[in-house]
Image (spheres, rainbow, N blue to C red):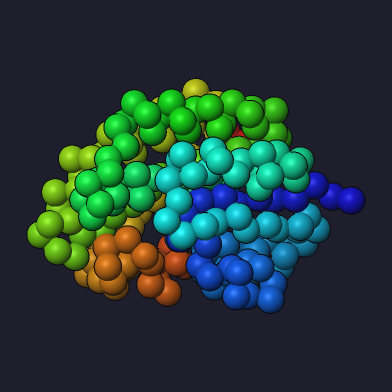
């Protein structure tokens, strides 16, 4: 049996996968799966996103949701909730804790043939959200550092979606600044599919 492709993250990955008979959700993972299958991909595609998750939440379920599947490709997409909870719940995650927790996860899949990390994004739709960059930008930089450290493909999503927001308006990409619209979903899927193959291990 072919080893699976696993996507793990928060609500952006989840996309209501548990109400989807195919268990892929109705977001960017489904679009990626459609493209991969059209290209003849035979491995199972597994969505393990859970809405609201932060790095610490991924750590709590990592063994069951990633390691137990013995995947041949792992994509990790997390970070916006590590910022958001600071502002809506006064429950901050320091950049140091975020990076160290993320590093510990990646260390357990260092031998997986392909590892992909997706940069968290924000397209602010309110003045308050503009202030979130103070917290998010260092975490974005941490994700980029970890991609280099582990030789992972890095999906530079924030820049891609920021450019799209400038062209179409922020709400056209994510109507609340965080959760992608249909256009945002397509751009995320396209960015994943266009990841740099030179970093494939």
Q: Is residue 27 above or below residue 103?
A: below
- In the picture, measured across the screen, residue 180 lies left or right of residue 30, that is left
What percent of the width, then of the height, locates residue 83?
Answer: 29, 46
> Can residue 194 be seen at all in this image of the molecule?
no
- In the picture, measured across the screen, residue 114 lies left or right of residue 171, that is right
Q: Is residue 123 above or below residue 104?
A: below
Identify the residue shown where x is 68% and y is 57%. 46
- For the C terminus, the image quarter is top right
> Can residue 126 be seen at all in this image of the molecule?
yes
Q: How many marks?
A: 0
Q: Is residue 140 above or below residue 107?
A: below
What percent of the width, then of the height, locates residue 81?
Answer: 36, 50
Q: Is 26 or 115 nearer to us in this picture? A: 26
What percent of the width, then of the height, locates residue 113?
Answer: 71, 35
Q: Is 97 or 170 nearer to us in this picture? A: 97
Identify the residue shown where x is 78% and y is 55%. 43
What percent of the width, then of the height, locates residue 109?
Answer: 65, 32
């Amino acid at each position: 049996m072919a080893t699976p492709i696993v996507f793990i993250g928060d609500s952006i990955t989840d996309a209501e996968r548990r109400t989807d008979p195919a268990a892929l959700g109705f977001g960017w993972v489904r679009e990626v799966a459609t493209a991969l299958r059209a290209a003849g991909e035979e491995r199972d595609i597994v969505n393990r996103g859970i809405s609201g998750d932060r790095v610490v939440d991924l750590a709590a379920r990592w063994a069951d949701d990633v390691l137990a599947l013995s995947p041949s490709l792992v994509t990790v997409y997390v970070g916006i909730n590590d910022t958001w909870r600071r502002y809506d719940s006064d429950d901050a995650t320091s950049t140091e804790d975020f990076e160290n927790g993320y590093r510990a996860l990646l260390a357990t899949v260092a031998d997986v043939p392909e590892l992909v990390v997706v940069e968290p994004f924000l397209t602010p739709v309110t003045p308050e959200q503009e202030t979130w960059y103070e917290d998010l930008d260092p975490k974005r930089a941490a994700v980029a550092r970890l991609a280099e450290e582990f030789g992972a493909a890095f999906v530079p999503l924030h820049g891609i979606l920021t450019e799209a927001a400038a062209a179409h308006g922020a709400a056209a990409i994510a109507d609340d600044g965080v959760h992608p619209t249909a256009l945002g979903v397509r751009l995320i899927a396209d960015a994943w599919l266009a990841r740099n193959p030179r970093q494939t291990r």
